[in-house]
Amino acid sequence: MAALKTSQKEITFKAPTGSGKTYMMADLMNRVLAENPHVVFLVSSLSKGDLARQNYEKFTEYKDKNRFPHLNPYLINSNVAGEERLYIPPEHNVYLLPRDLYKKGGRLMQGAMDAFLMELFVEKHKKFILIKDECHIATKNLDSISDNFFEKTVNFSATPKLARGQHPDVEIRNEEAENAKLIKTISWGSEADTVADALTKFEEVKEDYRNLLGVNPCLIIQISNKHKADEELQNVIMPALHTKPEMKWMLIVDKEKECETNDVFKAKKLPVARWKNYAKSHTATIDVIIFKMVITEGWDIPRACMLYQVRDTQSKQLDEQVMGRVRRNPRLLDFELLSEKAQQLAMTAWVWGVVSDEQKKIYGVKLHDDPQEIIDNVSIKTTKLKPLAQKKDFDITSFMAKQEKVTNHQSIFELGRQLRQAENQVRGIVYDYATDYTKWWEAAECLSELEKANRAYLCDYAQSMEVQAQHVSFALSSYYTDNEKYLRIGNWIWQRRDGVEKFSFDSEAEREWAEILKEIASEAVMPLTVGKIKKSKRGKDVFEQIETDTELHGKEIFLWGKNFVANSSIKFEYYMGSLHSSFPDFVMKDRFGRIHIFEVKSVNQSGAYNFDANIYKGKIAELKNCYRQASKLTGQIFYLPVVKNDVWHITRFYKGEENTLSEDEFKKFVKESP
């Protein structure tokens, strides 16, 4: 929204495939239309895969569910009889255009599109915004009229074309989408693994997928588009499948006559054109789907959890659009209800293929040897905010009795829309109170007052904050994306899975703060010896602690580390317009047993990132309020180190008190006995 209000003519939005770009696109259009009903959106989508129709159906579904009520979508098509003139009705505000309809010789370019644009642009004074879905695919004919009609162009893609100037103005990175549980984390298979190995892995996962997620998973096998495809099928894929006769498979290619399946009881009875719709259902019994390179944009199959790319494919690397097919969260809408094991399963995708340079920059990390000893020695208390319903003196009946009686009643449909958009905590209060229709209406009409009361209570951390967990520690394993802000560390809690002692950090400020903690570790941080070999009385060297009497050797590490967000439980809730979780950047245990928690910030402007200074300052202020109360409740020491012009300004929260320290004062404090 902020980017659209700049003077830029063209805006590019980048987000990973599977993260919900269609939903975000609908949200953006709904917000714009709420502010300016004179805007009209033309959404150009790919023709292959019928992406335009898919988007249209999604937008219609959102509108029907009152999620984005300002959308009034229309699918442009050329299905008119004989010589009948193609007509586009002008009363809609979102028009879905399959890209290939607007081409030379097509009916749209025989005057219909020009007439439509002129009517809305000249006669009705509408403002057009062009949205290019999957903008990495060229739209030359639309580009030729952009300057005449379109006030803005918004590009959406997971892989925008930099060569065409599509540099992301707004970007959701892979790791951000993974942390938000929108897309799965990739577990890379070995380059030596065969199709048979992938099928074996699929068999291992299948039972858990069904039992824990209630979803039938599937494996996608990608083969070449051209002359190698038949060879790959006959010599590589089919021999492996023949060893698993119980597996149902489906081969889908461009020409229907080449499609095949061994599912004679279900898929074989359907027209080939409906195979994709059947295969994407959570209950579909197809285990393996074999595709040529055509499986790219516009086909959602969240139950797909594995992708195998045949080694001799002509593709140099796995396209991100292809990987996106197996990265969607199959239980996105009720993810929080799943067990921890089920959540981890739902958020893992197994991929075998030629890894792209970008994907190679993701590194796995794990705790050093003796991880349980690290976990036992670093015990952290986390906090959460209680809902208004748990406030001691809050009673919904008494609250309702104090409200002014409503004389101008709203419709049930409008009340329902407002209630659906309310925060979960407030919605829960209304439904708990609503034992009958009359009470539902009464509570719904006081929704704004309830929301005000909820906000006021949540922001008063002295009342709303409580300890969530008494004993949380670092995750056993995690990962990070290489951001080229490097520091070599060999003696903290983490080790990279590849054994390299080089880590990168999210920002230069983080890297510099890690350097400070590394510098003081030998004097200030509690040490721990890991990887010890024990010697039993029987004289046999073993790693288990069996009647041990001598520790032969081990590696000394210091109990501090980056709080890598993936798999982390180290978080603290705060309220800023809605509930948020702060995942601090670093945790350290000093030699006196105190826990130190750091959230690093920088106010230095960066050429790579632009941020709203007021929002940023507001977040820092809210984090201060959160950490102040959390330090009082948990006894832990919280810090907000902020770097400005190479000088650290360190705010410390200790037992509910706030102090500002210099870098030297901080170093002195952590080294001194309390």
Image (cartoon, grey):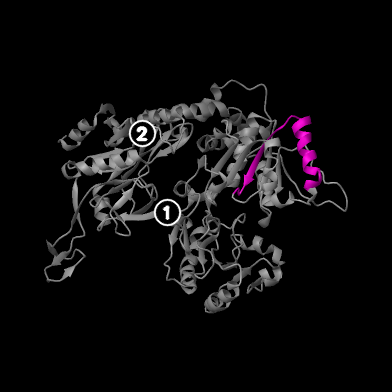
The image quarter containing residue 661 is top left
Would residue 651 be seen by someone viewing this image from the given angle?
Answer: no
Which residue is denoted by mark 2 in the rendering?
602
Distance CA(mark 1)–CA(mark 2): 34 Å
At a point 30% along the width and 34% down the height, the residue shown is 639
Residue range corresponding to the magenta coloring:
108-135
- Lower sequence index among marks 1 and 2: 1
Q: Residues within 10 Å of mark 1 (few under 14, many from 20)?
A: few
Type of amino acid at the residue the image marks with label 1: Glu
Was residue 122 drawn as part of the magenta stretch in this picture? yes
**Horizontal side of residue 343 vs 631, given as left or right:** right
| Closer to us: 38 or 180 | 38
Task: Tell how many labels.
Answer: 2
Q: Is residue 344 above or below residue 447?
A: below
Type of amino acid at the residue the image marks with label 2: Ser
Identify the disc placed on residue 556: none
Which residue is denoted by mark 1 in the rendering?
340
**Horizontal side of residue 627 vs 491, given as left or right:** right
Q: Is residue 451 above or below residue 499?
A: above
Would residue 35 be seen by someone viewing this image from the given angle?
Answer: yes
Q: Is residue 307 above or below residue 574?
A: below
At a point 54% along the width and 74% down the height, the residue shown is 237
SS class of the residue under badge 2?
A: strand
